[in-house]
Amino acid sequence: MDAAMLQDSPRSGMGGVMTDVAGRVISATEFRELLVSHRQMVRADRRVERMRGLQDVETGEIFLTDERRLLDGRR
């Protein structure tokens, strides 16, 4: 995965117009699997809510997980 894809990026729609798309909350395990998948993803974090996010570049889907559980393999 390209390092550029993992940089923080604003949630934007076509032509760079900002959109507030609701994301789907997934488990930390699913989130880690998306990080290493072949899908092209960009970051879509929601830091105020303490959620880490990935947005699928092709479909626009946003996947979120609680940042406190992301590195804890027991949850």
Image (cartoon, helix red, strand yellow):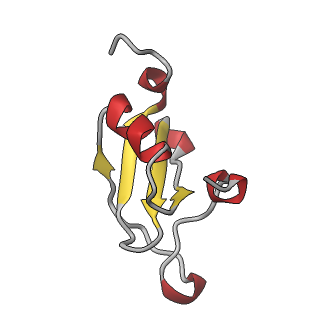
Q: Residue at x 46, y 39 (%)?
A: 49
Q: Residue at x 49, y 41 (%)?
A: 52
Q: Position of residue 4 (x, y in %)?
A: 71, 59
Near-viewer residue (63 or 46) = 63
- Quarter of the figure with residue 19: bottom left
Instruction: Tell me if 32 is positioned left or right of 5 in this view.
Output: left
Q: Position of residue 55 (x, y in %)?
A: 45, 60
**Placement of the C terminus among the 4 image quadrants:** top left
Residue extending farthest bottom: 15
Q: Residue at x 51, y 59 (%)?
A: 41
- Quarter of the figure with residue 25: top left
Residue extending farthest top: 74
Q: Position of residue 38 (x, y in %)?
A: 46, 56
Instruction: Tell me if 60 is positioned left or right of 7 in this view.
Output: left
Q: Position of residue 71 (x, y in %)?
A: 50, 21
Near-viewer residue (44 or 58) = 58
- Quarter of the figure with residue 21: bottom left
The number of callouts visible is 0
From the viewer's perspective, is residue 7 above or below residue 14?
above
Near-viewer residue (47 or 29) = 29
Q: Residue at x 42, y 74 (%)?
A: 58
